[in-house]
Image (cartoon, rainbow, N blue to C red):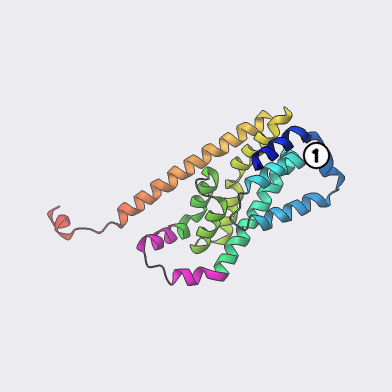
């Protein structure tokens, strides 16, 4: 019944065009983008996909304003989530986790957290909010986390908004090239981070005194 109802709505209810949506948003005046920004920040504090806001922002406000709102709100939301989790529960979690792997990852994030965070944002193998919570439990510093989040969200955000804007037929191909270039940088960063981690693990391996004496 629900499927039939949804199908009927799609058939009989007129769907507004992108131009009509942007005209509708403009009628609310400059306060509407601000309210949308605040709602984006608050909602994405929780494990809710931010893609919904990214697409909606691009459709309502256009490509460049949509990108600015999505990246700005995402960065602010990530920093707030990081600080909230640290205030409310990081010490509690740390006191109860004894696995050596956790502390090794924690130390790795503390040394070059910006690279790991940026790579995760660029490649996006883990949901946005989950990355925030995991980083909050680590020792990564706030400023590198914020900068890495800001730049790391760019290719995915640009790509999603360009995809949404493609229905207008007016998408600037230069933005698509920029999104692809940033994604390539993210892949390089992820490879560099894994290589550095493997090199550190090799240096941290315990030496065999007998083997050393043999050499």
Work out whether 143 lies above or below 33. Answer: below
Q: Is residue 59 left or right of residue 197?
A: right
Name the quarter where the N terminus is drawn.
top right
In the image, 151 versus 9, the foreground residue is 9
Magenta stretch: dominant secondary structure: helix
Q: Is residue 81 left or right of residue 59?
A: left
Kindly indicate the quadrant of the structure image that contains residue 46: bottom right
Secondary element at image label 1: helix
Residue at (63, 45) in percent of width and height: 51
Residue 3 pos. (x, y %): 65, 39
- Membership of 99 in magenta stretch: yes
From which residue to which does the magenta span run?
88-108
Residue 9 pos. (x, y %): 73, 37
Work out whether 111 lies above or below 123. Answer: below
Q: What residue sits right under mark 1 in the picture? A: 22
Q: Is residue 46 left or right of residue 111?
A: right
Kindly indicate the quadrant of the structure image that contains residue 168: top right
């Amino acid at each position: 019944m629900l499927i039939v109802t949804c199908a009927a709505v799609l058939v009989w209810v007129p769907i507004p065009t992108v131009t009509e949506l942007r005209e509708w948003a403009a009628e609310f005046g400059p306060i509407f983008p601000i309210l949308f920004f605040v709602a984006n920040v608050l909602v994405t504090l929780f494990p809710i996909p931010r893609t919904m806001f990214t697409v909606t922002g691009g459709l309502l406000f256009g490509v460049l304003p949509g990108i600015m709102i999505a990246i700005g709100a995402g960065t602010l939301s990530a920093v707030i989530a990081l600080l909230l989790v640290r205030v409310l529960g990081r010490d509690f979690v740390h006191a109860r986790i004894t696995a050596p792997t956790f502390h090794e990852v924690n130390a790795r994030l503390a040394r070059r957290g910006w690279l790991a965070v940026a790579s995760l944002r660029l490649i996006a193998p883990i949901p946005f909010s989950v990355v925030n919570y995991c980083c909050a439990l680590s020792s990564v510093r706030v400023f590198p986390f914020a900068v890495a989040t800001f730049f790391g969200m760019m290719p995915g955000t640009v790509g999603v908004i360009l995809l949404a804007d493609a229905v207008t037929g007016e998408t600037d191909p230069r933005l698509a090239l920029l999104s692809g270039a940033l994604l390539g940088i993210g892949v390089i960063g992820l490879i560099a981070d894994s290589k550095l981690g493997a090199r550190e693990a090799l240096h941290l391996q315990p030496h065999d005194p007998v083997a050393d004496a043999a050499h």
